[in-house]
Amino acid sequence: MKEIGKFILILIGAITPERWRKEVNHKINKTKRIMTSNLELRVFWKILFWPIVLVVSLVFGVLKTIAVWLIPSEKYGTMLFRFEQFYTDIANRYMSLPLALKRASLRKELFTKGAEQRKSFGDKNPDIIFYVIRPYYFLEPNELIYRNVANLLTQYYYVVQKLSYAMENNWVPVVDWENYGKLPHAEDYPVNGTKNSWEYYWKQPSNYTLEEVYQSKNVILSTQNIGQYGYIPNCAMTPPFNEYASALVDKCTKYTWAIPLNDNTLKYVDEFYKKLFPANKRVLGVVVRGASYGRTGTPYHSHPMQVSMGELKDTVHTYMDEWEMDYIFFVNEMQELVDTMKEEFEDKLIVLPRMRDTFERPADGITKNPMYYEGNKYQTNLDYITEVALLSRCTSLIGSMSSGMRTALILNEGKFEDVYVFEKGLW
């Protein structure tokens, strides 16, 4: 029945003019709710369509079974992913059929051009297998990408996934964020003497340069997909979040020691630690995401739902007393939420002075965030990493799960006295 519904929605999307599609889908959904509003109606429709549903379901079942047996598992999973995304573009994002087909073609490219590859670039280091960690393939938003640019610390976790894979296979890893398209976090000029935007903030996991690696005999280019290898928790943050948080601490530090902050970044973090954190005081780290899915939801249903500010303030008050905290260090990218916390906690609140976004900026997917204007990207992300590094140095931690909280848990290596993660489920 689910497959039939998807097929019908794709068909409607293909024949309905784009300017009418959202309204048509809205009316279809309202009609569905009206016509199935009570048990009697739902039973009636099930009885009426049961023979048709049975036949079509059998046909789909047979076709899927044949595909499972004839197509290699990896290719079958890829095809299923591409179909699900194609369906989402048509049925949920109201895209035109030509645009949805273009996006399907891009995804095919992801699984071919962006697949893991074994290369030989020269005769150097014949006894070493290098593993080049490439960035996620969907780099910059364009007509084919639905505002799906992973933030910097999400990209960091993709690197940790691939790093774990390389280290478990005894390959020599090196991160290349220079030669596979410009990341949305990269500037148009060298930063700290490098064009490799990974090296803006972190050290390489080995002592070999990219130049030497690309002259070597045995080189594996990583997949440019997310990468899930089973050595650390999946990239998708799934409930129960307290268990996910514990797994991060237990499993990730086995690998992340190899990619510490570089000297420039660490110096910047240390300076603000001394400047902001009172000596010998107990500081409660607090982190929630404010923009995008943090406030209004997201079309990507794997993202954790964030806690409301009212509940957050109440919880912070509770644990400030229970855990005997002196100060609060608050991490958030939205100025209005920082102002709200300042009003509530006054001189007990510590925040990093930095450029922030505002809810006054239209959330239309077009109006660009000033934090990511050309020339602002490096400083914005340096401040973001600094906030998270300072968060990892707090006495205890409270927050909703996000890339920032995940990274703070990893950097802290289990030293927090207490951790409280809000369990709000997924959007």
Image: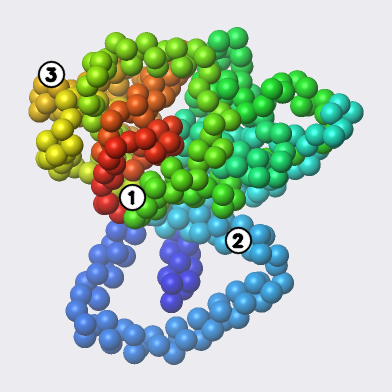
Q: Badge 2: few (under 14), some or many (20 or more) residues near its Cα, within 10 Å?
A: few
- Asked if 164 appears above or below 267 in the picture, the reply is below
> Which label sits on residue 347?
3
Q: State which quadrant residue 9 falls in.
A: bottom left
Image coordinates for residue 248, horizontal then vertical, percent: 44, 44
Residue plotted at (64% across, 35% down): 133
Q: Which circle's residue, 3 or 2, is located before the other in the chain?
A: 2
Residue plotted at (51% across, 86% down): 55
Q: Which circle's residue, 3 or 1, is located before the other in the chain?
A: 1
Q: Which circle's residue, 1 or 2, is located before the other in the chain?
A: 2
Q: CA distance from mark 3 to mark 1?
A: 30 Å
The residue closer to the viewer here, 6 or 134, is: 134
Q: Amino acid at mark 3?
A: Asp
Image coordinates for residue 129, horizontal then vertical, percent: 78, 37
Residue plotted at (80% across, 34% down): 128
Residue under pointer 2: 77
Identify the element where label 3 is drawn.
helix
Decide if residue 408 is in sight here: no
Q: CA distance from mark 3 to mark 2?
A: 53 Å
Residue under pointer 1: 242
Of marks 1 and 2, the one in the foreground: 1
Q: How many marks?
A: 3
Q: State which quadrant residue 275 falls in.
A: top left
Q: Badge 1: few (under 14), some or many (20 or more) residues near its Cα, within 10 Å?
A: some
